[in-house]
Amino acid sequence: MTTDPKHLTESEASAEAARLIREAYQPTEEPRPVTAFRDTTPVPAVGTTPPVPQPETRIVPEWAAGVAVASIGIGAGATGLGCGAWLILQGLSSVTLLGVLAIAAPFVGIATVATAIGAAISKAKRASTTNIYRGTVVQRTEVTATARGMLSRAKAGR
């Protein structure tokens, strides 16, 4: 019997087709997934053990890999901020009064000069004109209430 489709007779082709269909629809047992691996090779009594291949079949989803990378980045950033804060607080804990005064002295000097300049400009702008009023001054302190009632307002006399 020839399996080349060009040289098959009608009956041979029919028989081959029936065989292929029978094989295709024959129930097959699904292979069970491997959940454990036991190495049965004997271990040498002395010396190192030879390497044994251990196939890796796990697949990590993209979102899980992204979360892992992001958490590593966040952890590294938090560690960096913590180290920076520690360094700053270590520096602040060793501050003395003399150190504070040495750092603040230039700023205090600049502020004093700026205040003096501002006061001088303010005095220069202020005119030294003395206003002299001539005439009689009348001061009235009487209050005359003409409105009556609970919600009325008082008016000053003229």
Image (cartoon, grey):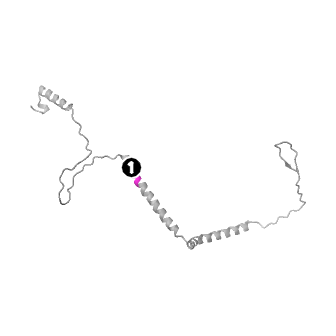
Residue with the most extreme top position: 11
Measuring from the top left, give residue 113's x and y in whole percent: 65, 71
The residue most toward the right is 136
Crowding at dot 1, Cα within 10 Å, few <14 / some 14-19 / many 20+, comes out as: few
Using the image as rendered, state which of residue 20 and residue 80 is in the foreground.
Answer: 80
Magenta stretch: dominant SS? helix
Q: Residue furthest left?
A: 1
Front residue of 135/105: it is 105
> Seen in the image, is 45 located left or right of residue 146?
left
Q: Amino acid at mark 1?
A: Gly
User: Which residue corresponds to the image point at 73% horizontal and 66% vertical from the top-left?
Assistant: 125
Image point (68%, 67%), residue name:
118
Write the start and end of the magenta stretch as one range.
64-72
> Which x, y percent locates residue 8?
11, 29
Is 69 covered by the magenta stretch?
yes
Percent from the top left, x then y, of residue 15?
A: 14, 27
User: Quadrant location of residue 11?
Assistant: top left
Task: From the image, tell me which residue sits under label 1.
Answer: 66
